[in-house]
Amino acid sequence: MTEKILILDFGSQYTQLIARCIRELNTYCEIQPCNKPIDWDDSIKGIILSGSPFSVNDPLAPVVDIAAMGERVPVLGVCYGAQLMAKVFGGEVAKSSTREYGRAFLEHSDKEEPLFYDVNLKSQVWMSHADTIVRLPEVFTPIAHTDNIPVAAFKSLTLARHPIHAVQFHPEVTHSLEGKQILRNFLVHICGMHQEWTPAAFVQETVARIKAQVGDQKVVMALSGGVDSTVAAELIHKAIGANLYCVFVDNGLLRKNEFESVLDSYKHMGLNVKGVNAKDLFYGELKGVSDPEQKRKIIGRLFIEVFQQESKELKDIKFLGQGTIYPDVIESVSVNGPSATIKSHHNVGGLPEKMNMGLVEPLRFLFKDEVRRVGKEIGISDIFLARHPFPGPGLAIRILGEITPEKVDMLQEADAVYIDLLKEMNLYNQVWQAGTILLPVQSVGVMGDERTYEFTVALRAVTSTDGMTADWAHLPYEFLAKVSNDIINKVKGINRVVYDISSKPPATIEWE
């Protein structure tokens, strides 16, 4: 049984960062809403209480039984988690006289304090809270302070069977320069974790688990050409071999020549894949539709229908494989209930309910960068691992307004020029995702002695780790000048190119 840390999510924007830091320390962890009862077993070795947008003094502020947790495992409170500890055990938390955001310097004096092993006596940390602990309960001992906060970290060794620690800063963010060391100290010196969760260990455990789950039954899986579905398929293939049946649907909204090239690559991997050309079906149903949410729903519905039809032709299929990854799961079970619908066509929903099959989701608890590391471990080519993320609805949400085959052709050509030039100039791997958007805007241009009235495309390129936040990529002017010139010269119907310099938030990565 894999040992793990449980992170109770109180709604903080940083909760996923805590998980990512712990995973990077070769330790498995899971995020769970704070309002869900803990399903205790021997694999849980420690609990971390996250930050929160709530104040602990709000009437509706979430509360958990910290003492009961401490009877079972060590506990670490972070920011809100720390303030909650102080309040429930009789201390006082109040509004800070000055809002405490940004850099601060943590000072501790006890070199033997386990939480601060190998941490400088004065270390930069990151604060992000409007409340502060005014009075610490007697059951706790302060172990660090800053210039403005007398209680920046504290602990109790007597409140419960296991030690309880807390910090009023965020060790998980990069601005806390030794924050990862503090988290490592909690894992290793306080929880006794062995830091054995590696890509190789994950592969071995996952393949064994799939074999146990599926046995000699058959699995059907839809492939997209993306990293997630490809790595998931290869893991399932390692477990059950030829009993995995894959379907790759061409909805007419893929990149130029992508259907043929990806299908060929899959067959070279030894996967049993059937390619289905469904372009005309998708184009027909999307005709005249401009609303982005409606486009997504049509594409999602049609994909399910095509996939179901192909699956029916296979006999005795008992399981459905999916490339669901952890951010999908977290968004679907957030502390405040399911996240607001920003966009449809989500991996977690759709197929399972309609197909009455068991689910096989090898990547369900991995972040995107972990999926790539696992893919590398099992020998998947960079053709897949280095590919930028591509939206499920494909070019449909990069064509603003109505979709026509002519617009798809135009966008495929322009996008191919853009992506090929990024690769040629060694810029492709410097950005997380790049794509071309066809705008429903025509403008006047001049080509030779002729007046033109043609379309505009917007180029999008962002830097990110997992797509949760993103900044626009600062591509060289020389590149932008060349790509603009090449698109206008090579793609008939486009006479203007613009570059999107919006970050996420407030903008999304895709335009629809």
Image (spheres, grey):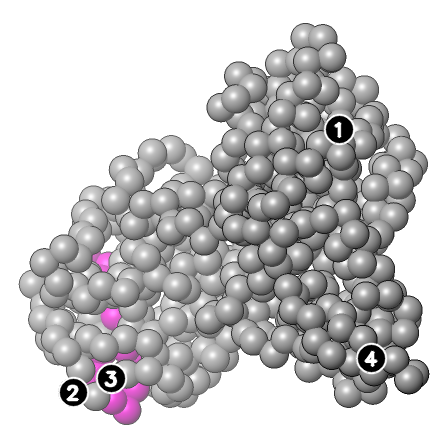
Q: Nearer the viewer, residue 508 or 91?
A: 508
The location of residue 264, given as percent across then percent down, is 91, 38
Q: Residue at x 34, y 53 (%)?
A: 9
The residue indicated by pointer 1 is: 247
Kindly check if marks 1 and 3 are in contact, taking CB atoms under 8 A apart as contact.
no
- Where 487 falls versus 31 (above or below)? below
Numbered tag placed on residue 451 in the rendering: 4
- Where 488 falls versus 281 (above or below)? below
The amino acid type of the residue labelled 3 equals Arg
Q: Nearer the viewer, mark 4 or mark 2?
A: 4
Question: Is residue 245 something that shows in the picture?
Answer: yes
Estimate the spatial distance between the alpha carbons at disc 4 and disc 3, rounded to whole Å: 58 Å
Judge the density around disc 4: few (<14), some (14-19), many (≥20) Cα neighbours within 10 Å.
few
Q: Nearer the viewer, mark 4 or mark 1?
A: 4
Estimate the spatial distance between the alpha carbons at disc 1 and disc 2, rounded to whole Å: 60 Å
The residue indicated by pointer 2 is: 97
Judge the density around disc 1: few (<14), some (14-19), many (≥20) Cα neighbours within 10 Å.
many
The amino acid type of the residue labelled 4 equals Arg
Query: How many marks can you see?
Result: 4
Estimate the spatial distance between the alpha carbons at disc 2 and disc 3, rounded to whole Å: 7 Å
Q: State the SS at label 3.
A: strand
Estimate the spatial distance between the alpha carbons at disc 4 and disc 1, rounded to whole Å: 47 Å
The amino acid type of the residue labelled 1 equals Val
Magenta segment:
143-159
Q: Residue at x 73, y 68 (%)?
A: 455
The location of residue 126, given as percent across then percent down, is 39, 79
- State left or right for residue 196 relative to residue 239: left
